[in-house]
Amino acid sequence: MSSTLGSNNDKLDFQGRVAIVTGAGGGLGRQHALALAARGAKVLVNDLGGTVNGSGGSPTAAQAVVDEIKAAGGQAIANGASVTDFAAVQAMVQQAVDAWGRVDILVNNAGILRDKSFAKMELADFQLVVDVHLMGSVNCTKAVWALMNEQKYGRIVMTTSSSGLYGNFGQANYGAAKMALVGLMQTLSIEGAKNDIRVNCLAPTAATRMTEDLFPPEMLEAFKPEAVVPAMLVLASEQAPNRTILCAGAGTFEAAHITLTQGAYIGIGDHAPEALAARLAEVTASEGEQVPQSGAAQGSNEVAKGMAAAGRG
């Protein structure tokens, strides 16, 4: 992590900051927008206003959250752009700049579900989920990237999922899109670091309009969206880490890591397939695994092991 909070008394303050939260008309996004506004941020509340599966659209959901923020004394504006429409997303960012002069925080939260087993899933449903979750986040991030580089400050939160990190039956499209966001975060966090643009992922577990049917009734209160918000606030704050996958649900917070095992040098001769099969448990063993700081670490590990093996020979 780039920095950490000094103590429990260090208040996360967003005074003077401008935030865009997508998919903020309800559920997690609404709670994100309310929390940022309550701590002083000016918030553009984006929501297409469609159904869970992405159909339809209405500006009323976003405006209702804006009204809620204003009633509490905060500043907010509504936007009904689809995150899949790059021109509309560019106009959304310009709307925030016109109103408040900058954009400091982007919370990519907009998403839809079209769950079905892969055998029964139409490719159009796979494509649309990828378009909304992955390309929607790409569009919004691209639209703020130059601005954040110019102002030498930015905080971007990608919303990933345990379904992407670890898989979930019936969510091949959703899981693929959510894991792709981790890959996007990994590279953007490297590219943005020199200008203090910190990019992280949030993996929430919460009972929202999209997921409440998955929870037993007695667990709905524990898994309310508000319980995820502290993780978002940390990732969006001045003190945010960089390149972290933070998991949150029901008051518990964890970090997920993509690790590299120590592996083993097998060689490249005709014997390699059988040797690898025989030593696969050694190759996949977690002892001594690392969290690489870039993709080059894999190659470095392989070169080191290859040179060591050559030295032994």
Image: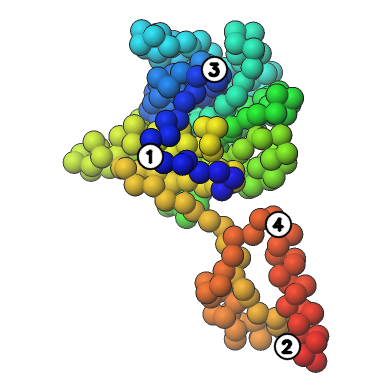
Find the residue positioned furthest to the left: 218
Report the mark closest to the observer, 2 or 1. Answer: 1
Identity, as a three-letter code, of the amino acid under mark 2: His
Q: Position of residue 38 (x, y in %)?
A: 40, 19
Q: Position of residue 194 (x, y in %)?
A: 73, 39
Identity, as a three-letter code, of the amino acid under mark 1: Asn
Q: Are marks 1 and 3 in contact (CB under 8 Å)?
A: no
The residue beneath circle 1 is 8
Q: Quadrant of residue 310?
A: bottom right
Return the disc, 2 or 3, that comes first in the chain's sequence: 3
Q: Position of residue 256 (x, y in %)?
A: 49, 53
Q: Residues within 10 Å of mark 4 (few under 14, many from 20)?
A: few
Left or right of 220: which side holds 291? right
Asked whether 250 or 181 is in front, the reply is 250
Residue 161 appears in the rendering: no
Label 3 residue SS: loop
The residue beneath circle 4 is 295
Of the numbered discs in the image, which one, if any, rests on residue 16?
Answer: 3
Identity, as a three-letter code, of the amino acid under mark 3: Gly
The residue beneath circle 2 is 271
Return the disc, 1 or 4, that comes first in the chain's sequence: 1
Q: Are marks 2 and 1 in contact (CB under 8 Å)?
A: no
Report the mark closest to the observer, 1 or 3. Answer: 1
Label 2 residue SS: loop
Return the disc, 2 or 1, that comes first in the chain's sequence: 1
